[in-house]
Structures are given as C-alpha cells and as structure tokens.
Image (cartoon, rainbow, N blue to C red):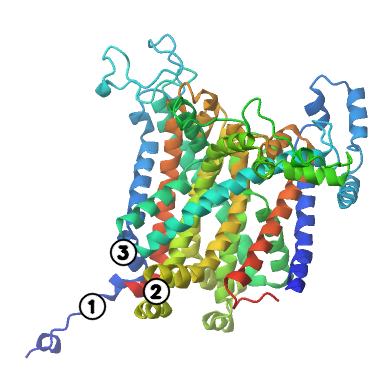
Amino acid sequence: MVYYILRRLLSSIPVIIGIMVVTFVLARLIPGEPCRAMLGEKATPAVCERFTREHGLDKPIYVQLAIYMDNVLQGDFGSSIRFSRPVTTILIERLPTTMELGLSALLIATLIGIPAGIIAAVRHNSPVDVITMVGANIGVSMPVYWLGLMLAYLFAIKLQGTPFWLPPSSRLDAGVVSIPFYQVWGWQVPPGTTLEDILQFISNFYVFNSLITGDWAVLGSAIKHLILPSLALSTIPMAIIARMTRSSMLEVLKQDYIRTARAKGLRRQLVILRHAFRNALVPIVTIIGLQVGTLFAGAVLTETIFGFAGVGRILFEAITARDFPIIQAFTVVIAIGYVFINLLVDISYTFIDPRIRLE
Amino acid sequence: MATISETFPLKVRDYRSNSLWRLTLRRIFKQRSAVIGLTLLLTLLLIAAFAPLIAPYNPNQVLIGIEPVRARQAPCIHLLGCPADQPQHIMGIDGNVRDQFSRVIYGARVSLFVGVTTVSFAVLVGTLLGAIAGYTGGWVDNVIMRILDVLLAFPSLLLAIAIVSVLGKGLINALLAIAIVSIPVYARVVRASVLSVKETQYVAASKALGGSHLHILLRRILPNAIPPLIVSATLGIGTAILDAAALSFLGLGAQPPTPEWGTMLGQERNQVFTAPHLVFYPGVAIMITVLAFNLLGDGLRDAIDPRLKQEE
C-alpha cells in the first residue's frame, strides 16, 4: 500500500511538470506586455524596460522557465505583478475560500444526490424515479451562473423580510470579523514563519475556524453566506452523482446475492443499504472524485456572481491581466489537488471493496 | 401443377428490415428521452431557421423613438392584461432598448452553430489522434496520450479562458478554445474502441489479405468507434454550448451586439435585482438547448448500448 502510494506520487511528477511547462508557455503567449497591462498604456519605454528587468521578463523564455522551476522547488512562487505581494500569501487567503465553497457544494451534492439515486433505483420506473431523472437532466443542463443569479434574486429580493432571506454576496456580514483560532487561544506564533502561514491558512476556513473557537455569530454569518453559492455550485455534481448512483444500484439490484438476501427474509432496508449500496459504491466514489474539476470550473462563475474572493475569480482576473506568477502558481496548485484527489479516490477503493488490492 | 411455394406457402421473412441501422433506429424511437430530445431539437432548429419570421423585431434594432418603451422595461403581454395601447414585448426590453424576445430567438442560431462546429472540429481532431495512438501503440501512443492527459488535468473552462486570452476575445476564438479543450474526450473514446478490436481475427484476416494500414483503420476498425462517438459527441454539444455561453458571460466569447444568450446574461447580470426578466429568459433558452442534446445523447446511448439488447 505504502509502496503503491509512493509510486503513484512519483508517476504524477511528470504530469505536474508538464502542467507547469504548459501553463508557463501559455501564460507567455497571452498577447500584450504585462508592463502595459499593469502600469497602463501610457507607461514610457524607460519605465517599461525597468519593470521588465525587475520581473526577469527580459531573459529568454527557457531561462525564465528554469529560474521559475528552481524557485518553485524551493517553495517560492514569486510575487504577483498586479498586487506586488508574494503569491504564497495570496494563496493562503484565497484557497480556503474556494475549498470551503467547493466542499460545502460537494457535501450538498452527495447528501442529496446519493439518496435520490438510491430511491430512484429501488423504485425503478415509478413516478419518483422519473421525477428524479428529469430533475437530474435539468440539473446538468442549467448554467451555473444563471442559477446563481436566480437564487440571489429569489432569496435576497423576493424573500426579503422573511426568515428565509439570504445574503447575495461576500463571505461574512459587514462588521463581522473572523478572528483566527490561534489568536483567540493566545498562541505565540512568530510572525512571517511557515508555521504562521499554515495556521493562517487553516483559520481562513471561516466555518471551521468559528466552529473550533465557538464564535457562533461568525459561524452563522459564514454559513448564511455560503448557502446560495454552494447550492448553485452543487447542482451539476448533484445531478451526476444521482444518475451514477441510480445506474450503479440498478446493476447491483439485479444480482443473485440480492435475491438471496431477500429470500432469506432480511429487512428491505438492510438489503438495500448493506448488500446493494456497498457494492454499488465504487463507481459512485469515482464520479464524486471526478466532480472536483467541475467544481473548480464552476467556482470561476459562482465566485464572480457572489462576490467571493476565491481562487476561481483571481485566476480569471490574472489571466485577463497577464499576472503570470498568479496564473502559474494557482494552476499548479489546482493540478496537484487533482492528482491528490484521484489518489485518495483510488485508495478509498480498498476500504469500499476489500477485494481490490493496490500494488 | 402446383409449385412448391404454392403447396407450402412459407412466410418469407424480410431480413433487410432487421438491418443494424433499422434496429438501432427502432430502438432509438423506443427511448422516451431520445424522442423528447429529438422533438426539442427539431423545434429549436425550426426556430433558428425561421428566426426572421418568428421574431417580431430585428434583434439589433434600437427602439428609441420608434416605440414608447424605455430600457429594461418589464414584459408586456396583451393576453396577460397588458394594456392594448402599449406595444407587446413578451420578454420585455433589454438595456439597449431592444426587443428581448427577438434577441432570444436569434440566439438559437448562434448557440446551435457554436455547439455543432466546436464538436465537429473536436471530433475530427480527436478521432485522428485517438486512431493514431491506438493503432500505432508504443511510444507514439504514450506521447499523444500523455499530452492529452495534461490537457485533461486542467479544469476545462479555465483552460478555455487561457486559450481565449492567447487568441483574443471573440466568438470564433471561443469556439476554437472549447474545441481544443474537448479533444481529449473524443481521442480517448476512439482509442479505446481501436484497442478493443485491433487484435480481433477479422482485422488479422484483413491484414492477411493485404489490406493497407489506412484501409484497415478506415474500413475495419474505425466503424466500431462510430456508435460511442455519436453518443459522446451528442452529449458534448450540450457541454460545448454551456461552456461557450459561460465564456460569453465572462465577456470573452461572442461580443455585443451579437444576440448570444451568454453575452445577454453577462451584460445584464448586475441588473438581476431590478430587471430579472433580462437574465431569466436567456438562461432558460440555454437550459432547453442543452437539455435537448443531453436527452438525445442519453437516449442514443441506451439505444446503442448492446448490453440493453438482452432486456428486450
């Protein structure tokens, strides 16, 4: 098992290097000088030349690539051209925002998608089945940003003044501040260290941070702000998970051992959950793992609509503003996330189905 | 003297009626989702083809000075009690004082064009790459598939955004970006079916008869890839339309005043609280179009999947 994980991690290195090279080259191909994009069209040639030299953009592209790779291996992603701040700091701020959004969307998608799929399969061809599948079909066909806008209109305007009102933008109510847990607990953390970065990263998950510090005002505010964007983001994964659960369950329910279990007189619920669902789980987990990509793409749109300062939005802005360090760092992080999640999915197979051995 | 056929009248079965294509067609029409999808799609095609007849206005005509309407006016439908002296605009007026309904109708042309062209391009290139990779094997296969793996490792919309940034904004570049992003899917489908039949006896027979590589690939191997390819292409058109609309929504795809649904949504998204009708209708139009292709694709898959034959 350990050997398998190591081998998988090693074999993902070429893919990640490939991604770094592709992003690097693609970023350089974006027409327009970063100097003019940053300093405006009126920047004088002299100013531009100094800017280009300062950011190392005057060297041949392969030298730039080599320098970049070397820096990344030392954990240095450089500084954002647009914000003049280290990319690592920006990552620490932005990544938790998107991860929190993505995780809650995935949670909603799984918690609704799987039961819906099971019920549809158990009551195959019944009205429940038809309604679930029609719903799932509409779910995958809906533009995420449209659903987001419509939800915002419904909950923020139409339901204004009712207890169902929900805020249409940002992560917290105005005036509500999330205090990092390590500051609440009075930990002495030397500023500017990696330890502080890590603690800062963790505390930027507002829901988690307020949960462990017991700050219910922040928790309520964070959850309230999270509901609409996660709901919008969850529809496509939810529909896909429901469909996969249904078809996988239908396949399993036809098996002889299910008939045996029923013939033994076991309770229906037990047969469905213990005998059928566990055996149907492998493709369902696979498809859940694959949703992470959908979530990242959806995050660009959802974050734009709900005013979330997350990874998706900053990447979109960086691409249009030619902020190379941000583009490169964030794509690499996303790619590593992909590799990691795929590995996690593969490892989870051994727990779901003991017959599967990873070697 | 009676002939044998007169003495023993045998009912001659018409074997041609059971040809593969007919069987498949019959199975497609048995699929409820395929029929619904096909009906929706035909309706959309008719709307796109006869847009000038259906739309009451020119989609780009600004109505200032022509009619007593103001920007972002709510829908006015005579049947639903809108005063008869006011001009009818069943989807309201957009931010530039144009008839929203006419723009939504013309939008069908853009979206269907986007879906079909991107997927055709991606299928062509994907088939070529997948066929070469699968048929040649070895290092060629490895190189092609690893490059496609790298493409697949990016979230597709982000990669499309990056490609559009390189090529420049605009509908055609957005089409190209989405096509490039979706190549790996088709390449994989084709490669898988090539691999599955490459070692079969009839391919070996064709080789023994002196068939050229091209002949074997085109006549013996690739026909096997067509059914799964049709299914994934149909489903892919839906995704392509969604992605193109998303790019336009972000301002990278079709540029105004093109009546493209994503662009229309993107331009008015900040007005959703004051003029929700300008966001609502284009979104519904996108949804129906994508739904049509998804339903058709699902139905085709169920009809073509040979595993379902046993259940009939």
Amino acid type at circle 1 is Arg
Left or right of B14 in this view: B237: right
Task: Classify A253 as above or below A15.
Answer: below
Tag nearer the camera, 1 or 3: 3
Residue B268 percent across, percent down from the top left? 52, 25
Tag nearer the camera, 3 or 2: 2
Q: Which residue is mark 2?
A: A254
Quarter of the picture holding the C terminus of chain A: bottom right
> Do the residues at pointers 2 and 1 share their chain?
no
Residue A115 percent across, percent down from the top left? 45, 57
Q: Which residue is mark 1?
A: B13
Residue A191 percent across, percent down from the top left? 88, 38
Q: Badges 3 and 2: C-beta atoms under 8 Å apart? A: no
For the residue labelled by badge 3, is the local secondary structure a helix, a strand or a loop? helix
Q: Residues within 10 Å of mark 3 (few under 14, many from 20)?
A: few
Q: Which residue is mark 3?
A: B26
Q: Nearer the viewer, residue B47 or B33?
A: B33
Q: Residue furthest left?
A: B1
Residue in the picture at 82% in, 24% down: A39
Left or right of A28 in this view: A317: left
Amino acid type at circle 3 is Arg
Q: Badges 1 and 3: C-beta atoms under 8 Å apart? A: no
The answer for how far apart the CA atoms under marks 3 and 2 are is 26 Å
Residue in the picture at 41% in, 66% down: B304
Of mark 1 and mark 3, the one earlier in the sequence is 1
Residue B185: quarter of image: bottom right
Q: Nearer the viewer, residue B189 or A115?
A: A115
